[in-house]
Image (cartoon, rainbow, N blue to C red):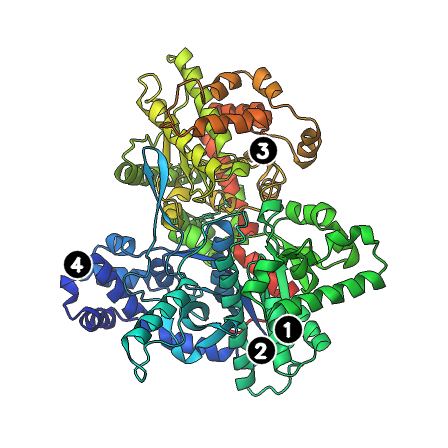
Amino acid sequence: MKSIDLKARIEAQAYKSYGRSFYDLHEKEQFVAVGNAVMEYLVPEWIQSKKKFRDQKQAYYFSAEFLMGRALSNNLANLEIEKEVKETLSEMGVDYNALEDAEDDAGLGNGGLGRLAACFLDSGATLDYPLSGYGILYQYGIFKQNFVNGFQVEEGDPWLEYENPWLVKDSNDTVIVEFSEEDKVEAVPYDMPIVGYGGQTINTLRLWSAEAIKKFNFKTFDEGNYIDSVKAQNEAETISRILYPNDSTDEGKRLRLKQQYFFTSASLQDLIRKFRKEGHKGFDDFSKLHSIQLNDTHPALAIPELIRLLEMEGVEFEKAFDIVQKTMAYTNHTLMAEALEVWSEELFISVLPNLMPYIKKINERLIGELEEWKVDKSLWDKFLILQNESVHMAFMSIYVSRAVNGVAAIHTNLLKSEVIREWDELFPGRIVNKTNGITQRRWLLQANPGLSGMITDLLGGDEWITDLNLLKNLEDRHEDDEVLERFIGIKKEKKQELAEYIQFHEEVDIDSESIFDIQIKRLHEYKRQLMMAFYIADLFNRIKEDPGAEWTKRTFIFGAKAAPGYYMAKAIIKFINELAGRVNTDVDTKDIIKVVFVENYGVSYAEKLFPAADVSEQISTAGKEASGTGNMKFMLNGAVTVGTMDGANVEIVEEAGKENNYIFGMEVEAVAAKRADYDPKIPMRETEGLGAVVESLVDGTYQDNGTGMLRDLYDSVVGRDEYFVLEDFASYREAQDRIAHDYKDKKAFYKKGYMNMANAGKFSSDRTIEEYAGEIWHISKKQ
Ligand SMILES: *Cc1c(COP(=O)(O)O)cnc(C)c1O
């Protein structure tokens, strides 16, 4: 891309979009003009990409969430035009950082599950695989989080208020989604380019927006019709209005069911129309040309819907079932009962009357198989899709899929040995593991240019950008003082940058010489942000007793959104903010420890936090975190993990060594044994310092402004402590104290971080996508 060319394009885009000179635009408008110019540049390549995969099998990632974050820097980096563009913009007098900040995050997801979908698309395009995404164009993404008096307050996220340069509306591909005879809407597709690194392949994320079928009707215009037509429009648009802000919980809401059917039906109609347009007569080849991955059960209605659509095309049920089973694969993301989707039959029939007969047929077929295989009737409740007047989405997904996968080794093993053991016995080999991954393009190349540059220098080339296993070659250099010093210097710089950012956005002064100990992820009791808070409260008490001792300086950083209806999670946020207020202002502690809860944690904030971390907090109750991907982003950026043997932590320490991380707490078996006979009052009484910390929730130390939240928090741990915060506290405290001790020898400490970075190769989503492509989707690359 010639710079001169770009300048002219940007200026022309400003005239076209705003009727003003580029130099008179405000930052958001300037961003749109630049984005449009980049789009104009990449669209010809995008068109080529759409053509090149014709006639070969393609994979489709169906997901209710795609947590994409910003696209400008990602697109420039992957097109390898970042340098030229920055130079051109600088000549034009534009501050690139401000321009970058003017882009709203595409926050179309809650957390890990949605971010995984985004990383997968990046890897698919980079590896030249035909992998498209299908989802929903929510008008409002994940809410914006504000803190008022330490309480979380939610605000809408109207991310589409300004023109979005990355979305292209394709009205020609509009389809109609029919919930029932009387209830139909238009699904209008908006396409976003997914630029692979190197720009060889540009895949597509197709997001559906809901619109009313009958818009303003000119012929029968009168006031009554006008009002009715506007009303219909409003009702239709409600379907894609908002992302449900729940993570790891199932709400069972009517509108949510409509959303799920809306995007899966539209996507399948899209695939069938293209298939016919390409001249296929019957549907014998459908499963040979399509592989659909269901990201959790949110898109599971694709199963009955595809059977229904095939029947409408004249395919009989058994044949349709076979095609659908060969087409679908399902990813399970959780072991937690409250996250498993179950719909009441009554609600289901009232929303989707036409789909229920197909679910019944699938269930009948399953019963036939259970009888044929002589499965004892006492076990049928482990299988039946329809039972207790409800529809079990996970069972349907397992039954009508060619493959079911867990997202980390320990998670898949628990699925096979416990949660869905009976399915594994009935269909051996169907349940497989695909350990999650992250894209190093966003989480290292873009987020941490300093470390990227060092890696490229040391390896003598930048092939690691598409082959992360090459990092292993850096392992030997951990004894090299020069290397280690450079590594430490880069970390220091990133910590300083973050300190300035936090000073500006959170108005808290933090010391970049201190340990940056970070927990960023959705707020959930099982993730145990509360345990880290208890540790800080205990440390505060200890410092108060002996303020003159040689304490290691530490900064504890939290970032997390709580689901708006999740009371306990909101109580934990309030508690941590209260704790921060106390610690950060006390004369004895404020120069030793600091606590910051950053507001509105999301992808863009994450890009600043991961590179600056010394310590990665991955402290879920063992058996609860399916995989985690935040843990991988920290590791790749050279942080050590303080964590339990849960999710991908197990594989992280397998790769990087237990000696380079801080593993603590009960393992899965111990948790199960403890659950049978647990009295939280015992660890509370017997663990030094813990009783005082827990009591401080209710003894007036902290205020909850009369809400009773802290009392409820107290009751939840002292009464039941479902997640074993108190039981694991002693072990966590020991690990944390060891970190503070080890940090005194910085070189030895950062050697551990360096070893983590050098051993992060396995956790590239490129590896994960190669596994899906080869073992589940059976798709091949094209250069
Ligand atoms: C990676 C990521 C997550 C997932 O974090 P976990 O610690 O794996 O739960 C959530 N939100 C954002 C913004 C992320 O980037």
Viewer-nearest of discs 4 and 1: 1
Quarter of the rendering occupied by the N terminus: bottom left
Which residue matches tag 4? 93
Q: Position of residue 229 (x, y in %)?
A: 34, 73
Residue that mark 2 sits on:
56
> In the figure, residue 268 lies in which quadrant?
bottom right
Q: Amino acid at mark 3?
A: Tyr
**Amino acid type indicated by mark 2:** Gln
Which of labels 2 and 3 is toward the front? 3
Q: Secondary structure at mark 2?
A: loop
Upstream in the sequence, badge 4 or badge 1? 4
**Would residue 689 be found to the left or right of residue 2 on screen?**
right
Select label 2 or label 4 by which is in front: 2
Measure the alpha-carbon separation of dots 2 and 1: 23 Å
Whole-percent x, y for residue 765 in the image? 53, 56
Would you place residue 235 above or below residue 319 in this image? above
Pointer 1 residue: 307
**Amino acid type at mark 1:** Ile
Residue denoted by label 3: 723
Relative to 646, residue 230 above or below: below
The answer to which image quadrant residue 137 occupies is bottom left
Residue 96: horizontal and vertical position, in percent? 25, 55
Q: Residue at x 32, y 33 (%)?
A: 149
Graded by Cα atoms within 10 Å as few (under 14), some (14 to 19) or many (20 or more), the crowding at tag 2 reads some
